[in-house]
Image (spheres, helix red, strand yellow):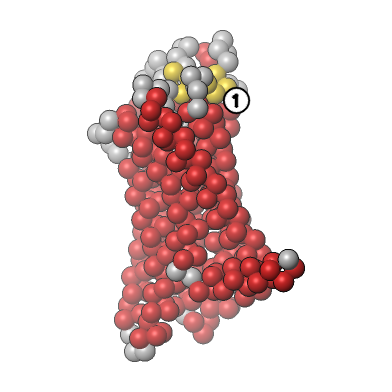
């Protein structure tokens, strides 16, 4: 049940960068470009992985899920952000804020686990090549994907319900660009130490446990790659892992800076730019990181272009 303390106003004011109109204009143009690239890049990965039979493998199955998460995340936040950047009205309804919070948190939580699953897939492919097809069976891949989604959606539901129970006492001005749990807790008129501790512990678990699995997996992968004598085989093995590692560092680095800092050591504007980086920039970079270094994906793209020219 939504807390009665927030029932007498219709929503929130997202200040964003309201004190810097020129910066808002620049950010509006940049974010529009990044959002369009995010839509095109991630939709291309999903379509290619679905249509090209050569990409019907666990790696591209999980990559399609990652692209879908990025699409959901940016679509839940960026359109509202652009609306607030283009003019003096910088409002979001209460329902819109809670919905944005739930979707963004669900996608972020799910991606934490999915990146670990993708690292385990790379470990199986490189360290257990003869048993890879048995280990990463399609049914097992579906179960892993379902587990990641269920965990992320459940965690987001719990966090969203908890934040709606925090008394806000009429405070509705959010000095941020998105609706996120840490910034909403700042609006509370009661002690939120318990909420902050709960958020910190859950965030630590969802970030550090998958990250530990990723580092362990890549430790075994590095050892296996080191033993590969042929330089071509070594380069191929490294090529399939480098892209994933870049995405891991981008995602976990920014998420850790936002959710695991013990005290507010950064300025509010720095937090806003950090949110823009992991909320807008990272989802745009992901498809380019994977496609530019991936021969299979580039081959599938050329194949699709060739078919479209023949039809034309």
Q: Nearer the viewer, residue 270 or 69?
A: 270
Q: Does dot 1 land on a helix, a strand or a loop? A: helix
Q: Quadrant of residue 73?
A: top right
Q: Find residue 71 and report its horizontal and vertical position in percent.
A: 57, 48
Residue at the spot x=33%, y=70% of the render?
219
Q: Quadrant of residue 187?
A: top left
Specify the quadrant that holds the C terminus.
bottom right
Specify the quadrant that holds the N terminus.
top right
Q: Residue furthest bottom?
A: 229
Residue 154 higher or lower than 244, as above or below:
above
Residue at the spot x=75%, y=68% of the render?
311
Residue at the spot x=39%, y=17% of the render?
190
Q: How many marks?
A: 1
Q: Nearer the viewer, residue 37 or 266?
A: 37
Residue at the spot x=40%, y=57% of the render?
248
Residue 268 relative to residue 13: left or right: left
Q: Nearer the viewer, residue 294 or 93?
A: 294
Q: Residue furthest left?
A: 265
Residue 146 higher or lower than 132, as above or below:
above
The residue carrying mark 1 is 95
Q: Residue furthest front?
A: 312
- Crowding around mark 1 (Cα neighbors within 10 Å: few <14, some 14 to 19, many 20+) is few
Q: Find residue 129 and report its horizontal and vertical position in percent.
A: 49, 82
Residue 264 higher or lower than 202, as above or below:
above
Q: Find residue 267 and report its horizontal and vertical position in percent.
A: 28, 30
| Whether residue 91 is visible | yes
| Whether residue 152 is visible | no
Q: Quadrant of residue 266?
A: top left
Q: Find residue 37 and report its horizontal and vertical position in percent.
A: 52, 50
């Amino acid at each position: 049940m939504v807390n009665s303390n927030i029932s007498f106003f219709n929503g929130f004011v997202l200040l964003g960068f309201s004190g810097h109109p020129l910066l808002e204009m620049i950010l509006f143009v940049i974010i529009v470009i990044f959002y369009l690239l995010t839509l095109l890049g991630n939709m291309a990965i999903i379509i290619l992985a679905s249509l090209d039979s050569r990409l019907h493998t666990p790696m591209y199955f999980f990559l399609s899920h990652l692209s879908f998460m990025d699409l959901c995340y940016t679509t839940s936040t960026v359109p509202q952000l652009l609306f607030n950047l283009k003019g003096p009205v910088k409002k979001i309804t209460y329902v819109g804020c809670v919905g944005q919070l739930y979707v963004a948190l669900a996608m972020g939580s799910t991606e934490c686990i999915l990146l670990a699953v993708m690292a385990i897939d790379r470990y199986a492919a490189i360290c257990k090549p003869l048993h890879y097809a048995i280990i990463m069976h399609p049914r097992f891949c579906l179960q892993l994907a379902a587990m990641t989604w269920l965990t992320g959606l459940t965690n987001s539901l719990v966090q969203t319900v908890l934040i709606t129970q925090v008394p806000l006492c009429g405070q509705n001005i959010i000095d941020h660009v998105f609706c996120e749990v840490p910034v909403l807790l700042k609006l509370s008129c009661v002690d939120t130490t318990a909420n902050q501790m709960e958020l910190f512990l859950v965030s630590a678990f969802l970030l550090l446990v998958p990250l530990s699995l990723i580092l362990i997996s890549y430790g075994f992968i590095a050892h296996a790659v080191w033993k590969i004598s042929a330089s071509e085989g070594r380069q191929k093995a490294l090529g399939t892992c480098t892209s994933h590692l870049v995405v891991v560092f981008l995602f976990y680095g920014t998420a850790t800076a936002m959710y695991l800092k013990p005290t507010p050591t950064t300025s509010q504007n720095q937090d806003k730019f950090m949110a823009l980086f992991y909320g807008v920039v990272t989802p745009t970079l992901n498809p380019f990181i994977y496609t530019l270094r991936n021969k299979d994906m580039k081959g599938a793209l050329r194949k699709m272009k060739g078919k479209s020219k023949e039809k034309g």
